[in-house]
Image (cartoon, helix red, strand yellow):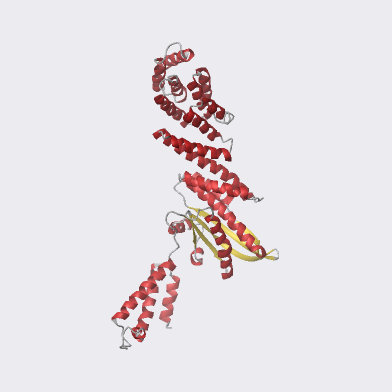
Amino acid sequence: MTPFIEKLIELALKNWRTPKGFVLFIALVLLALSGLLYKYDILYIFDITTVESTNKITFYELVILFLGVSLSSLFWLIQATVPKNKKDTVGIAIAIVTENENEKIKLKNDFVSNLQEKLMAENMQNTFKIIEYPEVFASEVNQSNVTKYMKKSRAHFFVYGSLKKRYYEGKEQYFFHLNMGVRHGPIPVTISKTFSEEMNQVSPRRVRFYVENEFEGFEITSNWAALAIEYIIGVAAFLTGDFKFSSDLHYKLFKEIEKIKTNLPAIKTLKEKNKMRLTGSLFQLQKIKYYLFRRNGKKELLDEVSEILEKIKSIEPRNYAASISRAILHFLRDRDTNAALKELKRAQYKANDIWRYSEAFLYAYRGDMDKATKSYKKAFHGFIEPHVPEESEEFIHDILKLEPEKYQLWFCLGLINFFAKEDMHLATEDFNRFLASGNENEFVEQRRLAKEYLKQIKL
C-alpha cells in the first residue's frame, strides 16, 4: 500500500462522518474498484462475456463501478448518520459508553433489553421506540450537545452516560453514570429549571453494584430508569398540553409503583410526585371536556368528566379542586343541589375560598338568597384566584339562558360585578334586571340591597 493511499485512509477515518470523509471514502472505493476492474476481467469471471479483455474497463464494468459506488454511499450514509426515531412514537435514545466488548454485551443483554421490555409492556409497543446509539456516536454525547443529538434522532428522551468496571472496596464493581435529557415544547425558564430538578430527583444518576450481582444490578437500574423515563415524559407531555397522554402515562406508572416494595428514597419521591402529576393531568383533562360541554352542550362529555373525577377520587379522595368539580357536575347533570353542597363540604376547609362561589350559587339557585348573599360576601373577602369571578359570571349567564325564571341569579351577577370585578356598569345592568323581574314580595332583602348598591354606584 502506497503512502498516498495510507494517508487517504487515515484522513477518511479521521473525518468519517463529515462531507470531507464521505468524499475521501468514495475516492478510495473508486480507486480500489477501478484498479480491480482494470486488471481483471470481472465480466469474464461471471460468464457475462466470452471474450477476455484485461487492462481495460468495459461499459458493463462501468455499470458495476457505478453500483459499487452507490452501495458504498449507502453504507456510509447508514454508518455516518445517527439512528432516528419512527414517526408518531416517543423516541428514547440510549447512548452509553463502555470500555470493552464484554461490557457492551452486558449492557445490551441486561440493561437495554430489560429497559425495552419494561417500556414495551402493557401494549405500549406502539408508543415507545428504543433508539440504541452505536459506540462511535455514544462517545460524543454530553450535556452540552445532548439537545442537538435529540433533534438529529427525533428523540423525545435521551439516556446517556458510561458503564465502567473497577475494583472498589476489595471487589469488582460496575459503576453506572447516567444522565437524562428530555425534549419538550417552549416553556418558561422557571418551569424548565423546576423540571430539571425533578429529573435529578427521580432518575438514577450514580449507581454501583457488585459484578457478582450484575444481573440483579442491571435489572434494578433499568427498572428504575424505565420508571423515571415514563414519569419525565409524562411531565413533558403535561407541559406541552397533551393531558391525555400525560395522564395515561402517570396512571400506568401509578399502578406499577404501587406494586414495588423498596426503601429507595428516589422511588418514594417518584411515587409522591407521580401521584401529584397524575391528579394534575387528570384534572386538566376534565377541565377541557367541561369547557367543551359548555360550548356544545353534549351530555356525553359530562359522563367523561364524571369518569375522570371518579378516577381522581380513587387516587386522592379529598382532592380540593376535584371536589369542586364534582359539585358542579352534580348540578349540571341532575340539578342535585343537595349532593353538590355535600360534595363542597369536602373542600370548605382548604386555604382558598373558591368553593364559596359554588356554594353561594347553589343556595341562590334553590332560592335561599340570604345564605347565598352571606356566602358571596365571605368569598369576596377570602383568597380567590383572579379568573374565578369571571368564570362564575359566565356560568350563571349559561344557566339563565336555560332557566330565565331563576331571575334571582341576576342579583348574584350584580354582587360579583360590584364587589369582585368592580365593574360598576355591568353591576348596574345586573341589579336593574333583578329589580325588574318577579314581584316586590319576593327576595325582599335582596331588592333592598340592590337599590342600596345602585345608589352607591351613582355617588
Q: Where is residue 100 in the image (x, y as percent from the top left)?
A: 57, 70
Q: Can I make out residue 188 in this image? A: no
Viewed as shown, does residue 449 lie left or right of 220?
Answer: left
Q: What is the number of callouts on the image?
A: 0
Viewed as shown, does residue 141 lie left or right of 4?
Answer: right
Compared with 305, 214 (above or below) is below
Residue at 57% x, 61% y is 111
Near-viewer residue (238 or 248) = 248
The part of the image, by quadrant, that contains residue 110 is bottom right
User: Quick one: quadrant of the N terminus?
Assistant: bottom left
View extreme (right): residue: 170
Compared with 61, 300 (above or below) is above
Near-viewer residue (268 or 244) = 244
Residue at 41% x, 70% y is 76
Q: Position of residue 372 (x, y in %)?
A: 51, 21
View extreme (left): residue: 59
Q: Position of residue 184 (x, y in %)?
A: 46, 50
Q: Can I make out residue 10 in this image? A: yes
Q: Where is residue 217 in the image (x, y as percent from the top left)?
A: 63, 60
Compared with 291, 356 (above or below) is above
The part of the image, by quadrant, that contains residue 430 is top left
Residue at 47% x, 38% y is 304
User: Quick one: quadrant of the C terminus?
Assistant: top left
